[in-house]
Image (tube, grey):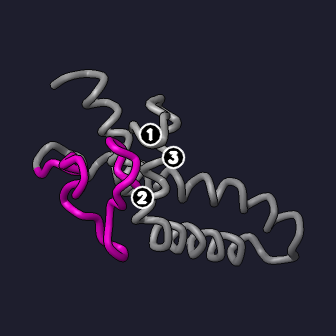
Amino acid sequence: MSSTGSTGFVGIVLSGLRLRCPSCGVEPMGEGRRLKEACGRCGWRFFRLGDGDWLVTWLVAYTVAALVVIIAWPIIHFTTSLSLMAEMIVLVGLGAATVALLFPNCQGMSAAILYFLRVRWKE
């Protein structure tokens, strides 16, 4: 990440969250809601088919959704007079919407995590 100057884990993950290449930190990782196969500037492949990279994306997306739901539950519970069933319906919808809306960013974060691991621990 020569342009941003940050090579630590947090800097790399934040670069992925912003949908920038975790290797160079400059090139956008995607076009619209779809990620490119590789960076156009440095050539880093974001995901490798068959390596289980999909599992990292799945874990990141559902962890983000779980955090949103965990933060939202006390707010909904203590500020509204909804029944427990209504709260659960709202929270399930919120979790699903979080995954749907933030999925490209979660893909970027997972690509950055995988980049960090592959650079630090050679396969």
Residue toward you, 74 or 101: 101
According to the image, label 2 marks what residue? 19
Tag 1 and tag 3, C-beta contact below 8 Å: yes
Mark closest to the chain's N terminus, 3 or 2 = 3
According to the image, label 3 marks what residue? 14
What secondary structure characterizes most of the magenta part?
loop
Type of amino acid under label 2 = Leu
| Magenta extent | 20-49
Tag 3 and tag 2, C-beta contact below 8 Å: no
Q: Is residue 38 above or below residue 98?
A: above
In this figure, what is the number of numbered marks? 3
* Left or right, residue 1 beside residue 119: right
Local packing at callout 1 (Cα closer than 10 Å; few below 14, some 14-19, many 20+) is: many
Mark closest to the chain's N terminus, 2 or 1 = 1
Q: What distance separates the C-alpha of mark 1 from that of mark 3?
A: 5 Å
Which residue is found at the position 12% from the left and 52% from the top? 49
Q: Quadrant of the N terminus?
A: top left
Q: What distance separates the C-alpha of mark 2 from that of mark 1?
A: 11 Å
